[in-house]
Amino acid sequence: MESTFATRSRLLLLVMAMTAASAGCTVPMGTLRPVRASPVDVMSIPTVDARALYRIRDFDWFRLDFDSDTDYARVIRRRELNVYVRLRWCGDGLPGRELTTARLFGDDGRVSASSRLLPVSGSPPGSSVVFRYHTYVLVHVPRGPVMPAGSPDQGGDYDLRQPADDLCVSVGGGDMVGNHGESKPAVYSAEVVGGVFSQ
């Protein structure tokens, strides 16, 4: 018959293993590099992108393009994570107050497990493979949410025409069991963001 000590030891190991499994792990999400920031005429938004945006014709939109060394469609397939874009004001490259979350797009629309992303062509030999992404955010959202609760575009109290600081953009993801991760951000300077509206 097994001793009480051995039984307790096995129970303790089982509890530790279950705790570790339920705590989740950190998923590498790569590094972003800014490419361009531009206001968008809603008529020029590709149809595959427009289908994933909420009430597209009722608002002014801003598009942010960026590169990453990570294939997020592959991350979604392998890790079964929900992936999204986070926007925050930031100073000295350090993320500050969160403004909103948004959807992640590739060349063929919203990035999902079924997306097949192609690396950016023309990368210098020997450099890491990079993928091009973009997202859309509202130009101006007054204090308080203007989107339905739970909308990925919910947020408030910012105006990109008069940025309060630099804009940090990162890609994050997570699942229901605690696995999560966030990329190193792409930083768009306040001058770049505000400057596109003065042209």
Image: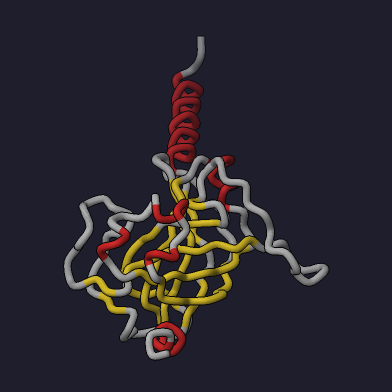
**Residue 4 pos. (x, y %):** 44, 20
* Left-right relation of 132 to 95: right
| Residue at 55% across, 74% down | 34
**Residue 187 pos. (x, y %):** 49, 77
**Quarter of the rendering containing residue 102:** bottom left
117 up-or-down from 33: above or below: above
Q: Look at the image and tell me whether residue 98 can be seen.
A: no
**Residue 95 pos. (x, y %):** 41, 74
| Residue at 45% across, 33% down | 18
Residue furthest to the right in view is 125
Q: Which quarter of the rendering shows the C terminus?
A: bottom left
Q: Look at the image and tell me whether residue 20 can be seen.
A: yes
Of 31 and 139, nearer the camera is: 139
* Left-right relation of 70 to 175: right
* Left-right relation of 4 to 142: right
Colour theme: secondary structure
**Residue 50 pos. (x, y %):** 40, 55
**Quarter of the rendering containing residue 11:** top left
| Residue at 40% across, 79% down | 90
62 up-or-down from 73: above or below: below
**Quarter of the rendering containing residue 126:** bottom right
| Residue at 34% across, 84% down | 163
